[in-house]
Image (cartoon, rainbow, N blue to C red):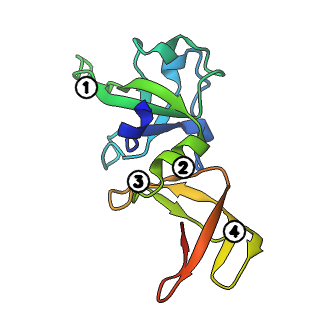
Amino acid sequence: MVAAGFIDQVAIRADKSPTPPENVRKPRRAIDVPFLPLVPLGVGADVDKFVYLHPSSPLAHMSPQELPEYVVYAYLQRATQGVDPTKTPKTRMHALTDVTGGQLAGLAKGTPLLTYGKPVKEVRATATEREVWVVPYLRAEGIGGSGWPLPMKKVIEKREVGKGWVVQ
């Protein structure tokens, strides 16, 4: 229920993302596990694209292996620049709850954040309606977010004049 109000404030574990980061050392604590937010933090080489769990988060007490694939957060926080200008402080997220890919697809249905790929498999079809398996994609359109594929889902599509097949 909480995730519904924060559907655009979701992050995926960086190692589970479609393009996992290279040369990232294995984290020993949950607060060192990198996540990629749906809405990117900024542009440029100096901007760290990862966010990390805040130490006060309930998820911070888990082991890195137990952390969920997707996390819904309330807000992001970055500490002020320290004495050493070469070190940039990490952006921390105040996690609210973990969600699954299926839950994300259900929560984002009917929003511009969710798009569907071409049908992978057709279950049954008539002239005006068909039941198919598709891959939903969660994307922050128009703001440079790459987005992620979610688990395959069975949907019903109806044929509309001038639009083709439309997911119901």
Q: Quadrant of residue 124?
A: bottom right
Q: Say which element carries label 2.
A: helix
Dot 3 crowding, Cα within 10 Å, few <14, some 14–19, many 20+: some
The mark total stands at 4
The picture places residue 43, in percent across and down from the top left corner, at: 31, 50
Sequence-earlier tag: 2 or 3: 2
Query: Badge 2 is on which residue?
Result: 105
Query: Badge 3 is on which residue?
Result: 145
The residue depicted at 55 percent of the width and 38 percent of the height is 14
Point out the frontmost of discs 4 and 2. Answer: 4
Q: Say which element carries label 3.
A: loop
Q: Left or right: 37 with respect to 122? A: left
Sequence-earlier tag: 1 or 2: 1
Query: Badge 4 is on which residue?
Result: 131
Q: Amino acid at mark 1?
A: Pro
Distance CA(mark 3)–CA(mark 1): 28 Å
Point out the frontmost of discs 4 and 3. Answer: 4
Q: Amino acid at mark 4?
A: Glu
The picture places residue 149, in percent across and down from the top left corner, at: 59, 53
Q: Say which element carries label 1.
A: loop
Q: Are marks 4 and 2 in contact (CB under 8 Å)?
A: no
The residue depicted at 58 percent of the width and 76 percent of the height is 158
Quarter containing the N terminus: top left
